[in-house]
Image (tube, rainbow, N blue to C red):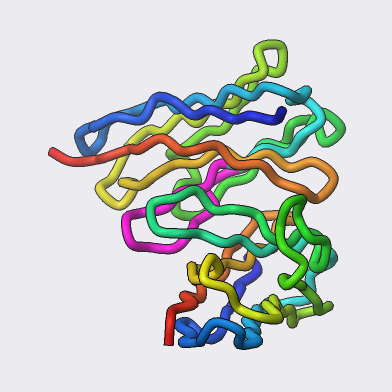
Amino acid sequence: DIQMTQSPSTLSASVGDRVTITCRASQSINTYLAWFQQKLGKTPKPVIYLISTLESGVPSRFSGSGSGTEFTLTISSLQPDDFATYYCQQYEDHPTFGQGTKVEIK
Amino acid sequence: EVQLVESGGDLVQPGGSLRLSCAASGFTLNDHVMDWVRQAAGKGLEWVGRTKNKDSNYATQYAASVNGRFTVSRDDSKNLMYLQMNGLKSEDTAMYYCVSWLSGRCFWGQGTLVTVSP
């Protein structure tokens, strides 16, 4: 199975900061890469799909990029509502998730 | 509106069985790839199993941790997906989510809680 490694595990940032989370795959994957936001006790919320397509209703400060084995989720200007845990997932076949990145208040 | 509603979660003893259901509305199930994903308390997300769509002959796939114990199935005529869980272990305790995929996008249900304990 494809392993997905996220970094960092925890990220301390302030409102207004530019934040980048990286996800590395153990082998090259196609376009089936998604990012999810999860708040405590809530269902994961899709943020990005197909590497860079913004889910409906998600603010434009979120963006996704990458190819091959390295992918990033960027929040251009962190807002109070963005403090949460983020997961990447490859979902073409035998899906796998990254271990998560907790974005916390600095 | 796309909606997924899971049910069937319960407290069950180790070695026991349970069947979860996922009821879909707002779309035709047979076009969608459907997954079960779980999350133990305080832990990350873990993919459990998949049933592919009609075009892929509804092929199923499983995570190594549940292969041989869990079975994913679907009844498109009723817009339902199931997860039959046998030989349950304490490490299967988690919130179980139903996820549907179409054209690269996904939709999640709210989850159903499975607790495996004596």
Residue A21 in which image quadrant = bottom right
| Residue A29 position within the rendered picture, expressed as x and y whole percent measured from the top left | 79, 70
| Residue A47 position within the rendered picture, expressed as x and y whole percent measured from the top left | 68, 60
Q: Is residue A66 left or right of residue B11?
A: right
What residue is rendered at 71% in x and 18% in y?
B76
The reply to whether residue A11 is in sight is yes
What residue is rendered at 49% in x and 38% in y?
B110
Outermost residue to the left: B118
What residue is rendered at 29% in x and 29% in y?
B10
Q: In terms of depth relative to the viewer, which is nearer, A75 or B35?
A: A75
The reply to whether residue B60 is in sight is no
Q: Is B44 covered by the magenta stretch?
A: yes
Q: Is residue B56 left or right of residue B12?
A: right
Q: In terms of depth relative to the viewer, which is nearer, B53 or B5?
A: B5
Q: Is B71 covered by the magenta stretch?
A: no
Q: In terms of depth relative to the viewer, which is nearer, A37 or B29?
A: A37
What residue is rendered at 84% in x and 66% in y?
A30
Residue stretch rendered in magenta on the structure: B36-49
